[in-house]
Structures are given as structure tokens and as C-alpha cells.
Image (cartoon, rainbow, N blue to C red):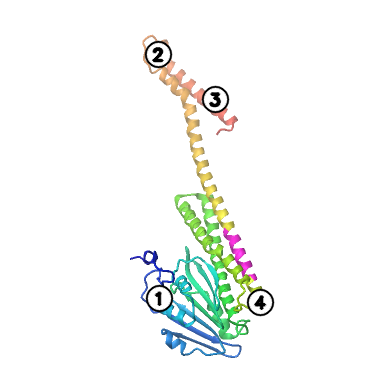
Amino acid sequence: MNAKAQNIGAPPGTLIYTGEARTDRIKITLIEYNEAEFFEDVYYDLDDCLSHVKPNMVKWINVEGVHETELVEAIGKLYNIHPLTLEDVVNVDQRPKFEDFEHYVVAIMKMITYNKEVESEQLAIILCENTVISFQEPHLGDAFDIIRARLRQGKGRVRKLGADYLAYALMDAVVDCYFTAIEKIGDKIEEIEEDIISNSNKKSLLQLYHLKREMIYLRKQVWPMRDLINNMIRSETTLINASSDMYLRDLSDHVTRIIDTVETYRDLLSGIMDIYLSSNANRMNEVMKVLTIMSSIFIPVTFIAGVYGMNFENMPELKTQNGYYFTCGVMVIIIAGLMIYFKRKKWM
């Protein structure tokens, strides 16, 4: 049975994974640091990972894979995470949102990549006291390599500030990937626009429709991000320091820019679609214009040929010695006269 179908009617807080069926092992990456120390290792067993957790250090536990609901539930019990939050973690079709609980906050969003089409994977970031837990699907990788590099090298503010800044840095890395995806989509839009203007065909139309659907999907994922970040800024939780508000406001500005760009591209795609339809309509009008002119030219000639093709015996012109040549001459004069008339009217 489909996992989404199983979720219908289940009690609230029931952990049912709604993504594609997977059998690979879940990888848990533990990073611990302060300004002077740094530790990083990869585990495939939760108990083994937790045995290396040290006090008085900022901890980042990154879980790659949410299909093993038992492991997600075990982490939830250890950090006292509400079952409804865990349900959102394993429901990979969750809408981006932010929720504030008594001793933790959670931000759920999508990591976006573009490689011929928009691809996304769900990311849940849970901020606890001195700890960040991130749950992600493993099939697309992530955007966190730059954060890991800063932590290893001790560059930037991330090693000097707390877990709330780490959560912000992870979200900022995800939003930066939105810019990369949108830039690639912009290049694709330019290609399609040039293709349609120069030589519109069915292939270009299919690409245009596909890209419009991609933009609708991207808009659906990006729009809630603004509310997510604004809710974080307005949150009264003690887990997010006031010093982090300026960074969150900057992140909100980035998301607003992305939303504006997405809306601009949607309008641009609609404009390209109008250009395509207008181009096809104009081409059809040109064809009809040529056919109409040809018909108009040959209508009087056809009339003459029809009259003298009736073969009545008392038609005096039928026995005229040069009647054939005279009739052909009249036809040529009519054709030439109509063509000159159409030229002067600029109809051809």
C-alpha cells in the first residue's frame, strides 16, 4: 500500500515515511566544536554516535535518510521532540514552515537543485539547547559542504557563535542554492525565448510548458520561506539570540529577492507563450493572406473559363478565329491588373 494512503486516518503523531521506498542505511554525521576544538565523524548506529557527544560544545547531528522511522523516533525521545514534529520530518511532502516549542524550534524547508529540471528534497532543522539536528533525504546530497569547510578551518563566525547561528548558516546555504537554481532557469528561459522568436516549433512549446510547471513548483516551495523566516524573527524563544536577528533579516531579504525573481520569470514565460501564440497566428494569417490573394486573382479568370466552357451552340465567340488567343490575353490582363492593384494597396 502507498505510504501516503496509509497516512490517511492514522492518529496524529504517527510516523509514516511518505517518500520513495529505500533500503540503504542511514548515515549520521556528528560535528562538535567550539572556538578552540573541532570533532567530526560519521556513524551508522545512533548509540555509537551518542557515545561521542561531549558536553560544553556546540553539536550538529546531521541525519541523512528519514525512511527508518524507528531511528527518527529514537532521536525524538532522546531530545524530547514532539511526535507531531517527527511526523512532519518523515512526511517528505511537508510545506515549508517554522514552529516554536518550549525547548526547541523546528524549520522545515526544501533544498532545491536544477539539472534539466527542478529537484527538491526535504530538510528539517531542529534547534535545541546547544544542539542542531538536521534531517534530510540522501539522494541529492546537500548544500552544507561550505558550512563544513568553515567549521573545519575555523573561518568566519560559525565557530565563535552558538547553535542558533549554525542553524541560520545552514538555512542560508540552502537559500544560496535557490539563487544557483534560478540562475540556471534564467539561462534556460533565454534559450527558449531565442528559439521561439527565431524558429518556433512544437519542441519549443513543450519546453516552455515544462518550464512553466517548474516555476509553479518552485514558487510553491519558495513563497512559504518568507513566512518561515519572519516567524523565526518574531519568535520569543530563548534559543535564538537577539544578535542572530540581523542575520535572519538578511536571509529574509534574500528570500524576497528570490520570490521577486520567480514572479518575474513567471511573467516572462507568460510573455514568451504569448509571443509563441502570436507568432503562430501571424504565420497562419500570412498563409491565409497568400491563399486569399491567389483565389482573388483566379476568381475572374475562372469565371471567364467557366462561361466559355458551357459549350452552347449559339455562343458566337466559340467560332471566332482568334477567340482563344483573345480570351487568354484578357485573362492575363486581368491577372496583371489585380496584382498591380494589390501591390498598390500593399496587400502583397
Q: Is residue 251 magenta?
A: yes
- Report the residue that reaches farthest toward the left: 1
Q: Secondary structure at mark 1?
A: helix
Task: Tell me which label, 2 or 3, sits earlier in the chain.
Answer: 2
* Residue 276: x %, y % from top left: 52, 48
| Left or right: where 65 falls relative to 187 | left
Front tag of 3 and 4: 4
Above or below for 333 versus 55: above
Check disc 4 and report its element: helix, strand or loop: helix
Q: Nearer the viewer, residue 77 or 245?
A: 77
Q: Which residues are the magenta region?
A: 249-262
Residue contact at pointers 4 and 2, CB within 8 angstroms: no
Q: Amino acid at mark 2?
A: Leu
Q: Which sits in the foreground, 169 or 115?
A: 169
Q: Which residue is mark 1?
A: 69
User: Pointers 4 and 1 in contact (CB under 8 A)?
Assistant: no
x then y, percent, for residue 202: 45, 50
Secondary-structure class at tag 2: helix
Comparing marks 2 and 3, which lies closer to the viewer? 3
Disc 3 + disc 1, Cβ < 8 Å: no
Q: Residue at x 52, y 67 (%)?
A: 96
User: Identity of the amino acid at label 1?
Assistant: Thr
Q: Give how far apart the Cα atoms at labels 4 and 1 are.
A: 35 Å
Q: Read off the residue under disc 2.
A: 318
The kind of secondary structure element at disc 3 is helix
Dot 2: few (<14), some (14–19), or many (≥20) neighbours within 10 Å? some
Numbered badge on residue 337: 3
Q: How far apart are the alpha carbons under marks 3 and 4?
A: 86 Å
| Three-letter residue code for mark 4 | Ala
